[in-house]
Each structure stands twice: as structure tokens, then as C-alpha cells.
Image: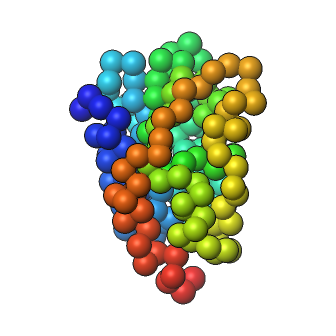
């Protein structure tokens, strides 16, 4: 794989797998400087009951333990939906150099509404990352219809 859309599609597939496992439908992958997929994570809310078990935060915790900040600066995190403030912060602190996302946080919020399991914030990741002392390149939204499809019917299910 060589382009952003391919990697975002892979993150969307990880989100599908998370949903099939009973979790919220979010996925994230970490791609190294050479284009190799290094690791992936789906949301873990359902399996662990961890409200902070977002795919991006889980991935960045694992990555920060496995790789140096210098290495992470050359890596890109691809995600099925725009990271929330917590996950954008995790990406910043883990040292990732760039971030690419599918569905925007604003469109995700409109899709989900005031669902108690995912009270989205209208706080773009660019705002969070732009407040830091180092640059994290952000690209997205992209493939929004594909990224939205994994959520169809999920948030309307009785919990």
C-alpha cells in the first residue's frame, strides 16, 4: 500500500473488526517510515468497559512503549474517524509525526447524536495538535462515506 486512502481503508476494516467483537466501531493503524503497518488497534470499550479504550489511545500507548520518540516522528497514524481530544493528545505525547483520518468528528457527532456511550466533542484534532510545541501533520477527512458505513445502525441499537 502506498497512499493515504489505502491505509484509511485498512483502519476502517479494523473498525469493522472491533464492531464484530462487540466494541465501538473505531480502528487505528500505525505505519512506519517505510510504509509497513507496524501495529493496529480497535476500540476496546465493549470488551473491557473502559470508556478511555479508544482505538487511537490504545494504539499510541502500545507504540510509545515499543518505539522511541525519534522513530515515531517518522510514523503516521491512520484512523477511521477523527481522533477526539484525548486521542489527539495521546498521538502528540507518543510522538507520531502525522495523522490521517476518515470521518470528521463533527460528522460523527451528527451521526451519533447525544449517545451516552460516545458524547463527542466538537473539538477538531487540528486544534488540539496545533496547541503543542511540535508539529503533527494532519490530513483528512477522507473517504467519509466509507468511514461512516461502519457506524450504520450501531448507535441506534439498544445498549
In the image, residue 134 above or below residue 54: above
Q: Residue furthest bottom?
A: 158
Question: Where is the C terminus found, in terms of image quarters?
Answer: bottom right
Q: Residue at x 28, y 40 (%)?
A: 6
In the image, residue 101 above or below residue 134: below
Q: How many circles with numbers are drawn on the protein?
A: 0
The foreground one among 84 and 17 is 84
Question: Where is the N terminus found, in terms of image quarters?
Answer: top left
Percent across and percent down for residue 59 are 52, 40
Q: Is residue 34 left or right of residue 29?
A: left
* Residue 17 in view in this figure: no
Q: Residue at x 63, y 37 (%)?
A: 126
For residue 38, which quarter of the picture? top left
Q: Residue at x 50, y 83 (%)?
A: 157
In the image, residue 90 above or below residue 121: above
The foreground one among 66 and 81 is 81
Percent across and percent down for residue 52 are 66, 55
Percent across and percent down for residue 18 are 42, 60
The foreground one among 50 and 125 is 125
The foreground one among 89 and 37 is 89
* Residue 69 in view in this figure: yes
Amino acid at each position: 500500500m502506498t497512499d493515504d486512502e489505502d491505509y484509511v481503508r485498512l483502519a476502517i476494516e479494523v473498525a469493522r473488526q472491533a464492531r464484530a467483537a462487540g466494541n465501538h466501531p473505531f480502528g487505528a493503524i500505525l505505519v512506519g517510515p517505510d510504509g509497513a503497518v507496524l501495529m493496529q488497534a480497535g476500540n476496546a470499550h465493549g470488551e473491557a468497559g473502559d470508556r478511555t479504550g479508544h482505538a487511537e489511545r490504545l494504539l499510541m500507548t502500545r507504540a510509545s512503549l515499543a518505539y522511541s520518540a525519534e522513530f515515531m516522528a517518522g510514523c503516521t497514524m491512520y484512523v477511521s474517524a477523527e481522533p477526539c481530544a484525548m486521542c489527539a493528545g495521546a498521538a502528540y505525547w507518543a510522538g507520531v509525526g502525522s495523522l490521517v483520518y476518515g470521518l470528521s468528528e463533527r460528522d460523527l457527532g451528527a451521526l451519533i447524536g447525544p449517545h451516552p456511550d460516545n458524547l463527542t466533542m466538537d473539538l477538531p484534532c487540528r486544534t488540539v495538535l496545533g496547541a503543542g510545541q511540535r508539529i503533527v501533520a494532519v490530513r483528512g477527512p477522507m473517504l467519509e462515506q466509507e468511514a461512516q458505513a461502519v457506524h450504520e445502525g450501531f448507535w441506534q441499537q439498544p445498549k
